[in-house]
Image (cartoon, rainbow, N blue to C red):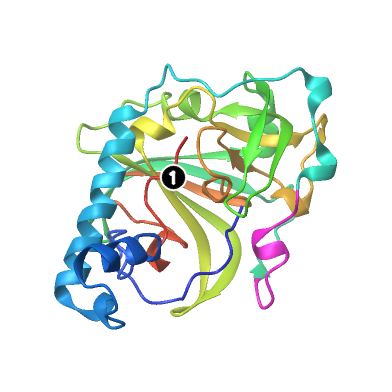
Amino acid sequence: MAPRPARQESGALDGRPTRRGFLRLAASSLLMAGCTRLDESETAQAVLSFFDRWNHQAGLLLDSPYRLARTYPRSAAQPEQMRPNGSVVTPGSQLIQTPEEEWTLTVGEARLEKGRMAQTYWKDEYTLGRLRRMPALEQTVEHVCVEGWSAICHWKGVALAGLLGRRPLRPGSRYVFFLCDDLMRSARGMERYSVTLDLAQALHPQNVLAYDYNGEKLTSEHGAPLRLASPVNVGWKSAKYLRYVWVLNEDMGGFWETQGYPRYYGF
């Protein structure tokens, strides 16, 4: 689920964006009220970076795998309120089309060096049929969008924690990077949609890689054939059109994070 576009600027691969729009006004008030060029200075950039890191770490400290999102009876689902968003409605976006019988999800663990692949420890491939044969997680939870609307949805799929738990992970692997088959336009050109979660966030028991939505096969407008549905994160963290899930030692950020949106956006 994508938020309204922020001012698009390039960012580092480590996930620390060059601008933090959500903190710019507060920082301006505190430091140099009335200075229109505040966010261009090195001092302001350092302050904004500090607050983003603080928000991220504070969120993770308050977060807990035992803090569960509220669940609802299946009859409470609100399909009429669940809006297609992201690349589906963004002009100039593209979707890599793959026949379902040829589609696979790649799940692996790797070591990066400054954002570049240095070593692959393991890699598994899952067809949609194989995922459907695995133990399923079903839940009716609220999907909350940063644009101000929400919808109660029923999801069915594979628990992300269970999928990642099939292999032992190395101590240095602290992040889970989701790379998708939809491409959106940014200051860097067309790029795949992506999201990063801290490993602790990713292992939350309610995160599901969903292939069914409200009792029916997931449709393209909602991210078919597979999407992340995370009820403890804002909607745009629930990446659609999933194709790769990598456990990494470096924070790769994501499509919106590198444009100024906060790394931590949980509830």
Q: State whether the magenta stretch is mostly helix, strand or loop.
A: loop
Above or below, comparing residue 243 to residue 140 in the picture: below
Q: Residue at x 55, y 24 (%)?
A: 69
Is 248 situated left or right of 229 in this image? Answer: left
Q: Residue at x 65, y 43 (%)?
A: 226
Instruction: Locate residue 35, reporting x and y percent.
Output: 27, 80
Q: Nearer the viewer, residue 243 or 30?
A: 30
Q: Secondary structure at mark 1?
A: loop
| Location of mark 1 (residue) | 265
Q: In which image quadrant can residue 128 be found?
A: top right
Above or below, comparing residue 13 to residue 119 in the picture: below
Q: Residue at x 59, y 65 (%)?
A: 4
Q: In which image quadrant can residue 76 be found?
A: top right
Instruction: Locate residue 54, reporting x and y percent.
Output: 24, 46
Is 88 magenta? The answer is yes
Graded by Cα atoms within 10 Å as few (under 14), some (14 to 19) or many (20 or more), the crowding at tag 1 reads some
Q: Which residues are magenta?
A: 83-93
Instruction: Locate residue 161, reporting x and y percent.
Output: 46, 26
Most distant residue in the left direction: 43
Count of numbered circles on the image? 1
Q: Amino acid at mark 1?
A: Tyr
Is 266 situated left or right of 76 in this image? Answer: left
Q: Nearer the viewer, residue 240 or 266?
A: 266
